[in-house]
Image: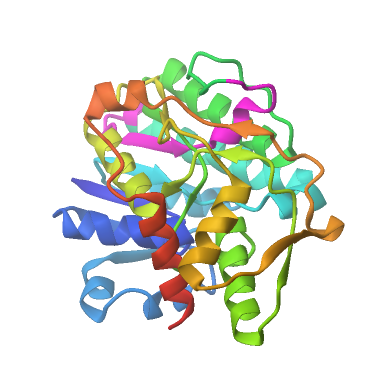
Amino acid sequence: MRVIVTGADGFVGRFLVRHLLETGHSVTGALHAGAEGLRSWLTAAEWGAVRWVPLELADRASVDSLAGAPSDGIVHLAGLASNAAARKDPGAAWDANAGGTARLVDAAARTVAEGRGNPVVIVVSSGEVYGRGGTRPFLESDPALPHSPYAASKVGAEVAALEAWRRAGLRVVVARPFTHTGPGQTTAYVVPALAERLTRAREAGERAVPTGNLDPVRDMLDVRDVVRAYVLLLESGVAGETYNIARGEGVRLRDVFARIARLAGSDARPEADPALARSADIPYLVGDPAKLVGATGWSPSYSLDDTLRDVLNAQAH
């Protein structure tokens, strides 16, 4: 397949580009200005195998140029991914996530109307759209009740994408990945942040590590399993449908802390720091993957300990 990846320079995008190349697909990577740092992640051969193009989601001409290029599929990862940044400026989150998605799917829909193709468009949303109140794994049929500006902007992206499917027949598939991590993720996210603090505590002989709230339960995946699901949805997802990407099992963040501590060789204990707490934490966020499994045969291949070990090893290099 000829696949366009928006946000190819992001944490998930890097893994997706690599997986697409490894599985024999032709890749166009869309980057925002100043994204040359991606060269340090990919090998020279991988970099050379990708067609790189600029993309600014706020610029309609830039989006039109990308979406109008011949392709069989688009995986739309570009946007604002940080909850903290979205809380600081909810309008910017909507501009990037909902507005950017609306521009992209509208441009892709015009290729359908003009008979120039009909790519499958994977619009990457988030399991966070379900919000609070869960006591069992969320189903795709459960209502979206976002409790953060980030999650709300992702609901906006879903609405824009599915409107283009209904109006123009654009083959939109919505993916709702739950919490995922892996080697190279920044310490703005909980797993690499805990890994860094625990490693530092071990090296300094410290017995306490500052943390936010460790009571929430999360469905935790490896980024490499998530990108594999995106490619399977390109191949087998049904247009107009939404799919959870989830393990289907919850783990309390306190247990994640203990697992990282064991793998890092640290005996430090967690110490609550109010400055690290998130006021909008969702107590329980676990997804039911049955629909994805039924459509694609997907299943996770990395255990949580495998992923945590790789995060620690990446930080050591």
Image-quadrant location for residue 200: bottom right
Is residue 297 placed above or below 141 in the rendered structure? below
Q: Nearer the viewer, residue 123 or 295?
A: 295
Q: Position of residue 171 (x, y in %)?
A: 34, 26
Q: Residue furthest bottom?
A: 204
Q: Position of residue 5 (x, y in %)?
A: 37, 52
Q: Is residue 19 magenta?
A: no
| Residue at image point 70% right, 79% down | 206
Quadrant of the image for the C terminus?
A: bottom left
Is residue 50 placed above or below 179 in the rendered structure? below
Quadrant of the image for the N terminus?
A: top left
Image-based side of 298 in relation to 138, left or right: left
Q: Position of residue 303 (x, y in %)?
A: 35, 49
Q: Is residue 118 magenta?
A: yes
Q: For residue 116, say whether it is visible.
A: no
| Residue at image point 59% right, 57% down | 257
Q: For residue 83, say whether it is visible.
A: yes
Q: Which residues are magenta?
A: 112-135
Q: Nearer the viewer, residue 231 or 115?
A: 231
Q: Nearer the viewer, residue 164 or 250?
A: 250
Q: Position of residue 112 (x, y in %)?
A: 33, 29
Visual colour scheme: rainbow
Q: How many marks?
A: 0
